[in-house]
Amino acid sequence: MSCIVFSQFYDSVLWLGRQLSGRMSDEKIAVYAGATKSGVIEKGEFRRLNRDEIKKRITTGELRLVIGTDAASEGLNLQRLGSLINLDLPWNPTRLEQRKGRIQRIGQLRQEVLIYNMRYVGSVEDRVHQLLSERLVNIRNMFGQIPDTLEDVWVAAALRDEEEAKRVIDVVPLRPG
């Protein structure tokens, strides 16, 4: 199975890549970040590599594990990869949809893609995820994407104003089904 892992933070990306490289010494791990921070980790050693070369190696199947910052959430077609892990959840729900759009797209090689959203129980991300998860599918089906106004939900939940977050979510009607 092949995978992309997202984090908002370059230090987290690099740390995770090195940790995984130590456990999976035969696997080359792509780090996709800013133009000067991208590369490949092989046997624990990071080597800078052009992002276009990383894309090419993913397409050919040479690279099966990609760890990236949000620089990887736009402009990459990763339908060769079968799973996505969000190491952290972005504040903007549209950004979350952009991440998912890297692998869940036309030309995907698999019938099903796996998406994992990591979060600590009781954290801000956990509360936001709980509030939105029930409605995201309906909202996306109605609008074709997640409206930018739902960023307010994330802020309200972060401020522990869950009633306000629920109010914003409930403005969008459920699709009759």
Image (cartoon, rainbow, N blue to C red):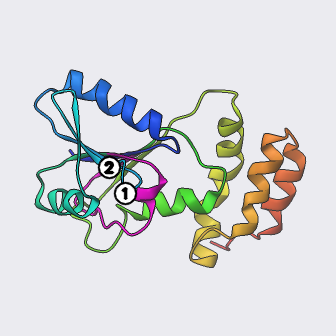
Residue type indicated by callout 1: Ala
- Residue 89: give x, y in percent of width and height: 58, 44
Question: Which residue is located at x 39 percent, y 69 percent?
Answer: 75
The stretch drawn in magenta includes residue 79: yes
Q: Is residue 144 above or below residue 10?
A: below
Q: Is residue 130 above or below residue 56?
A: above
Instruction: State left or right for residue 104 relative to residue 111.
Output: right
Question: Which residue is located at x 37 percent, y 64 percent?
Answer: 104
Judged from this view, the residue extending furthest toward the front is 36
Q: Are marks 2 and 1 in contact (CB under 8 Å)?
A: yes
Judged from this view, the residue extending furthest toward the bottom is 143
Mark 2 → mark 1, Cα distance in angstroms: 6 Å
The stretch drawn in magenta includes residue 57: no
Quadrant, the N terminus: top left
- Residue 106: give x, y in percent of width and height: 31, 74
Q: Which mark is residue 38?
A: 2
Are there few (<14), some (14-19), or many (20+) residues within 10 Å of tag 2?
many
Q: Which residues are magenta?
A: 67-84
Residue type indicated by callout 2: Ser
- Residue 42: give x, y in percent of width and height: 16, 34
SS category of the residue bearing label 2: loop
- Residue 69: give x, y in percent of width and height: 45, 49
Question: Which residue is located at x 17 percent, y 49 percent?
Answer: 63
Are there few (<14), some (14-19), or many (20+) residues within 10 Å of tag 1?
few
Quadrant, the C terminus: bottom right
SS category of the residue bearing label 1: loop
Q: Which mark is residue 111?
A: none
Quickly name the residue at label 1: 35
Q: Quadrant of residue 110?
A: bottom left
